[in-house]
Image: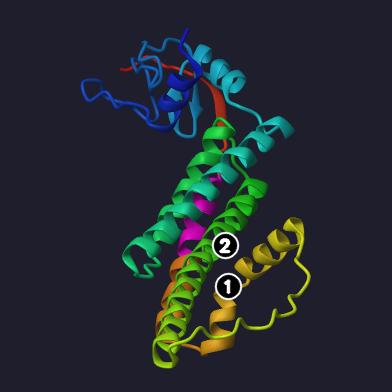
Amino acid sequence: MLSFCAMTDSFNNPTPQFGTAEYVGSPGGDHCEYCHQPIAGIYYRLNGAMACPSCAEKMRGELAKDTHAAFVRALLFGIGAAVAGMILYAVFEIATGLIIGYVSLAVGWMVGTAMMKGSNGVGGRRYQIAAVLLTYAAVSTAAIPIWIHYAGKQRQSHQQQSQREVGEGQSDSGQRNPEPAPRRTAPRMSLGGWLLRAALLGLASPFLEVWHGGLSFGWLIGLVILFVGMRIAARITAGKPLQVYGPFRDSPQP
């Protein structure tokens, strides 16, 4: 008995047999394109590919069904891929200092492929919607670790500058400057509130750039590439429905 993975691979890519002629009207002497056994009598068409009754029944029974559990698994796999894609996008920009929108294409492929892996090949409208949203969230929230990185560098630069100014003041006057009066600090935000605020700002980051800097050609190109990445995720998770035609009767060749 063929395994589910083998059957699925055969379903997606049936192996053509060039040594045997296929007759559309009179398929006598033909073979099943999944188990490659000769067909005698009854046969079916699975998405256009010839199949014996046994393989047709196996494909009907073994293909994964769209269940709540399959969708939850697809979401979990997709979220994991989205987090990995966000890290990839942020690390690439931090390491190179370049904003390359083409990373969005890789993120879309990662999310779509992971969701199909989690659902065992099941796709559909809700999988597409989830994949598109996860792809957008991964790319847009990559701005959060980037902001944190550059904010830390800026804070470190300010601290070094203030230390130099203090040192120069002491050397000029020959005496120590009085300590500054303590400043009032705003009440600290809770971790949950900070995470929520950061997530909202991250999701809005593609449009905050326009709000602060105005429209630019680079921003438009990046937005188009992001939409292409989302389209890649949607196309991968569309799924391919199994269409079974038949039964047909195999007639002997003249």
Q: Quadrant of the C terminus?
A: top left
Is residue 176 rendered to the left or right of residue 29?
right
Residue in the image at 76% along x and 62% along y: 193
The answer to which quarter of the image holds residue 253 is top left
Query: Most prominent secondary structure in the magenta stretch?
Result: helix
Q: Is residue 233 magenta?
A: yes
Q: Dot 2 surroundings within 10 Å: few (below 14), some, or many (20 or more)? A: many
Q: Is residue 187 left or right of residue 89?
A: right
Magenta residue span: 228-238
Residue furthest to the left in view is 19
Q: Where does residue 78 sit, x and y in percent of width and height?
A: 57, 44
Question: Marks 1 and 2: in contact by CB < 8 Å?
Answer: yes
Relative vertical location of residue 162 with respect to residue 3 in this rendering, above or below: below
Is residue 182 visible to the viewer in this orientation of the structure?
Answer: yes
Which residue was labeled with disc 2? 141
- Label 2 and label 1: CA atoms lie apart by 7 Å
- Picture quadrant where residue 204 is located: bottom right
At numbered mark 1, what does the secondary structure look like: helix, strand or loop? helix
- Expressed as whole percent of the image width and height from the top left, the position of residue 127 reads 63, 46
Residue labelled with disc 1:
205
